[in-house]
Amino acid sequence: MKKNIYLDYSATTPANKDVVDTFSKVSLDYIGNPNSLHKLGLESKKLMDASIKQIANLLNVKENEVILTSGASESNNLAIFGTINRYPNRGKHIITTKLEHSSVLECMTYLEKKGYTIDYVNILENGLVDLEDLEKKLNKDTVLVSICQVNSEVGILQNVNKIGEIVKKYPTTIFHVDGTQAVGKINIDLKNIDLYSFSSHKFYGLKGCGVLIKKDNIEIDPIIHGGKSQSNYRSGTPALALIVSTSKALRLALTDLDKKYDHVKSLNSLLRDKLSKIDGVIINSNSFCIPHILNISIPGVKPETMLHALEEENIYISTKTACSKDNSDSLTLTTLGYNHDISGYSLRISLSYLTTVEEIDTFVEILDKKIKELKF
């Protein structure tokens, strides 16, 4: 049987075995509810607090700024609706981009129906936010700016701290960043960010646990109500094993981060070089993209057709993001000005420090073969 070549790390990562072992140990040895007052509950609470402290230290934030959720989608929803519900009198104007994940864009669609004005800031040709346009769009009624740090389809890395500096000119405007595709891949600086979302399963943790960093000078309303929990902002029995394993996954992901980044960067360079020699392949990711994501188009070959053709060879990539609802053109590539021949035929290859040169060589060889079979 052929070995799997997994190149869809931006959709989800395989869980680190040490993280799974931690989850199992905590599940078996710490049976108490962290909110219970008896000995077993207090032991669980102590472990939970230690894990939250580690997450805070790793991200250089305060312990009370860490809110545990079920994943990045919930974190994004909590950030957006929590802000809107907490500050109903600050204004009904929100700024975002069309490069966002669906868990942000669909919140915006919903809020627009509720009477909010949603402004989509202009994107430059290179994929970066037009900072001049952002300044023009900001006003005293802007309650929230929500912009992803790394786009999940193409990998564009925004200068969120520069954006944060601009937003801070309006003291009543809150700045939310979806950092789901950034954590565990690049160095993170939350200095000018009010709310920051991410998910454990993107950095070799387990599915079902996410984080929202909420700076302590910011208030939000919960979207899940029900009494005492890990945080006043999110009710429900704390998922202790997931919380502890997330803390461990984050620590492991950030260990030797620069070395891991350099490995992925070298793989990206190799992949670009090899793909550029294949007739019919167009590379969409530019120099402003993180190396972990490489978006390509093969005009004339339907993305789903290529995906399944590669799947037959035990090679796994994706079309758009795993959470996309339909098979329409990529909104990201359309926003960047690409026509249907590019935006309608895009594929996403996502790399990891676990990816090998041999996997890249095999992938390119088989991709070339499949293009010739399907296109000519």
Image (tube, rainbow, N blue to C red):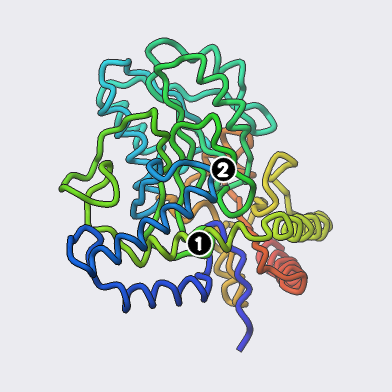
Three-letter residue code for mark 2: Asn
Image location (x, y in percent) of residue 363 = 71, 69
Which one is nearer the viewer's eye here, 203 or 319? 203
Q: Secondary structure at mark 1?
A: loop
The residue lying at 72 percent from left, 42 percent from top is 286
Which mark, by number, is residue 151?
A: 2
Three-letter residue code for mark 1: Thr
Left or right of 266 in this view: 201: left
The residue lying at 67 percent from left, 47 percent from top is 290
Residue 110 occupies quadrant:
top left
Image location (x, y in percent) of residue 284 = 69, 45
Q: Residue furthest bottom?
A: 1
Left or right of 18 in this view: 45: left
Which mark, by number, is residue 12?
A: 1
Quick check: marks 2 and 1 in contact, CB under 8 Å? no
Image location (x, y in percent) of residue 78 = 32, 40
> How far apart are the alpha carbons under marks 2 and 1?
15 Å
Which one is nearer the viewer's eye here, 15 or 111? 15
N-term mark: 2 or 1 = 1
Q: Secondary structure at mark 2?
A: loop
Asked whether residue 340 appears in the rendered view, the answer is: yes
135 above or below 287? above
Q: Residue furthest left?
A: 226
